[in-house]
């Protein structure tokens, strides 16, 4: 008898009476802390327990089963099965072979989107379900809908442009202007811009010879010329002169003299007039003075003179009055500079008279209440560790780990929690002839523009390992923790030069060091542990 196939088809009543199910019932009821060693190594046990958990215990329907996530795995205590198969999709396909195709799962396999036929098949499956014909795609299928359909990955491969994606799937069928949003890069296509400009004049009923007097920056933005305007310093006159060289002279446009914006008195007069016209209070100036607002007012030349930065313009008019944190947005990649990050915190603390003794109290909860905009920056550049930002910003203070409630390992390295301390000391004491670095190496995930600092990087016998303890996985303390953890797992698994080991909360809290030993050995880490750990 082929036992795996037998247990895939056995009825729920017989399934519920099997001995291994009785052990599993004790596990989920709390009477048992773990299943016997080797339970998940047997194929029939995986099939029996997973079927019982999903079909009987949860009562899931056929179409619901492939949609389960790690929260279900945790709730049903199926980490052992998941660790064996490495992904939910592979686990479900093993238990239910041939029942589900790739469309039934929330995630697709690695490299699935490399095959353009897979992209076309999945798109057409959605089109058929929604009753959308291929020729209707430009009018009915936009970026948000493609993301909703699970096509965000192929969309990114084509610059987040629905047109470019569709052009790759159906070459020559669509034009750029068929779509509601024009793709990036077409702001540099002169012939395309010229046709688009003439189409705008027809819609606005403006003769070409009257364009210099009647075409405004606001009109151009309305007709989606924002990219082209940026290439011409926000100036409608420069754009029109580029599209129709020799057709218009300076007399046709309301143009300011050369070097007009180099005179700060002109800048002050224009900015103060704008503030007065809109009735803006002085404390609201940083939030009011945006690039979009200045372009709408025909002040592209002013923006160009000040490097496209409203912040520089405001500082020229009100020198020293505002700091960077008071503006609605900071320049692109502003936080990539350590100097800017340090200055922001020092200025923030100086204005609020925050003393040295109070600095360790500046944690996530504090900024969530007083200045939430800093949180995403710390998440990206300090891996959510606020104490790192504080220590970097105030090197003149000799902070002790205890002031941030940090813990010190047996080798002097810092840990953030008692659980991390216990794991760290265990690693230091049991891994043979290795260099263990805690939170020292930075990895850049360019796809999501995130910096990751692993809990541990281990160097042993010319091999490198990354170990991450996801102690708050599925916790409600931080809403985005689990989502970022999933991105970390996917990223670390993709690194060719490193072996990645993920320690989940249940691995440590319920199974202790025995489970950690098993994970380390499975990846080839050499240990010196007591034999009682190795089962």
Image (tube, rainbow, N blue to C red):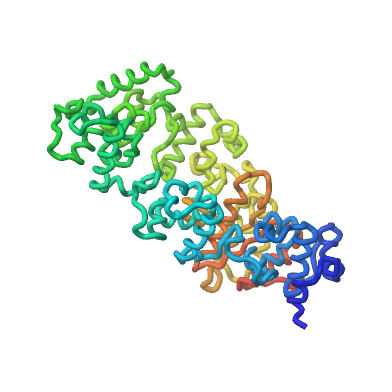
Question: Left or right of 440: which side holds 524?
Answer: right
Report the front residue among 503 and 238. 238
Is residue 38 placed above or below 471 in the rendered structure? below
**Residue 516, x across and y down, in percent:** 69, 65
Rendered-image quadrant of the C terminus: bottom right
**Count of numbered circles in the view:** 0
- Tell me residue 57's x, y (percent): 80, 59
Instruction: Decide if residue 430 is in sight here.
Output: no
- The quadrant in which residue 271 appears is top left
Question: In the depicted view, which residue is nearer to us: 294 or 433?
Answer: 294
Q: Nearer the viewer, residue 37 or 348?
A: 37
Q: Is residue 267 among what the camera can see?
A: yes
What residue lies at 57% left-to-right and 46% top-to-bottom? 385
Quadrant of the image containing the N terminus: bottom right
Residue 232 horizontal/vertical position (percent): 25, 39
Does residue 79 appear left or right of residue 352 in this picture? right
Residue drawn at 44 percent across, 23 percent down? 284
Q: Residue at x 49, y 31 (%)?
A: 348
Vertical comparison of 198 with 439: above or below: above
């Amino acid at each position: 008898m082929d036992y795996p196939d037998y247990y895939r088809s056995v009825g729920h009543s017989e399934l519920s009476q099997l001995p291994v199910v009785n052990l599993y019932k004790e596990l989920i009821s709390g009477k048992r802390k773990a299943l016997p060693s080797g339970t998940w190594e047997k194929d029939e046990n995986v099939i029996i327990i997973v079927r019982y958990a999903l079909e009987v215990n949860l009562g899931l329907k056929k179409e619901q089963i492939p949609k389960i996530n790690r929260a279900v795995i945790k709730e049903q205590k199926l980490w052992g099965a998941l660790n064996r198969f490495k992904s939910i999709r592979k686990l479900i396909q093993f238990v239910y072979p041939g029942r589900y195709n790739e469309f039934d799962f929330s995630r697709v396999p690695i490299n699935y989107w490399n095959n353009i036929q897979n992209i076309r098949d999945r798109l057409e499956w959605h089109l058929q379900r929604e009753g959308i014909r291929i020729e209707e795609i430009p009018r009915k299928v936009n970026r948000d809908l493609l993301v909703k359909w699970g096509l965000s990955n192929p969309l990114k491969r084509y610059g987040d442009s629905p047109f470019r994606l569709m052009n790759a799937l159906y070459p020559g069928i669509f034009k750029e202007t068929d779509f509601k949003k024009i793709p990036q890069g077409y702001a540099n296509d002169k012939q395309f811009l010229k046709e688009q400009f003439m189409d705008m004049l027809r819609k606005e009923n403006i003769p070409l010879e009257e364009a210099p007097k009647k075409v405004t920056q606001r009109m151009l933005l309305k007709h989606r010329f924002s990219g082209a305007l940026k290439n011409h310093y926000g100036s409608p006159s420069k754009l029109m002169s580029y599209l129709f060289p020799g057709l218009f002279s300076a007399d046709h446009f309301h143009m300011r003299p050369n070097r007009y914006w180099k005179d700060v008195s002109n800048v002050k007069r224009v900015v103060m007039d704008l503030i007065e016209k809109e009735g803006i209070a002085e404390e609201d100036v940083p939030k009011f003075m945006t690039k979009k607002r200045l372009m709408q007012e025909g002040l592209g030349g002013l923006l160009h003179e000040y490097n496209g930065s409203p912040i520089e313009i405001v500082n020229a008019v009100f020198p020293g009055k505002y700091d960077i944190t008071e503006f609605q947005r900071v320049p692109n990649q502003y936080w990539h500079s350590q100097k800017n990050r340090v200055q922001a915190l020092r200025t923030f603390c100086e204005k609020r008279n925050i003393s040295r003794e109070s600095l360790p109290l500046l944690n996530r909860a504090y900024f969530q209440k007083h200045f939430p905009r800093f949180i995403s920056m710390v998440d990206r550049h300090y891996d959510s560790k606020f104490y790192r930002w504080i220590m970097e910003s105030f090197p003149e203070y000799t902070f002790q780990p205890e002031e941030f409630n940090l813990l010190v390992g047996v080798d002097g390295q810092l840990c953030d929690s008692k659980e991390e301390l216990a794991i760290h000391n265990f690693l230091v004491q049991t891994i043979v002839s290795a260099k263990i670095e805690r939170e020292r190496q930075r990895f850049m995930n360019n796809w999501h523009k995130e910096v990751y600092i692993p809990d541990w990087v281990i160097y042993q016998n010319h091999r490198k390992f990354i170990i991450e303890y996801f102690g708050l996985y599925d916790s409600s303390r931080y809403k985005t923790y689990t989502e970022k953890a999933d991105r970390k797992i996917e990223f670390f698994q993709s690194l060719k030069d490193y072996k990645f080991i993920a320690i989940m909360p249940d691995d440590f809290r319920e199974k202790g060091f025995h489970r950690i030993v098993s994970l380390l050995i499975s990846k080839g880490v050499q240990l010196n542990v007591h034999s009682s750990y190795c089962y």
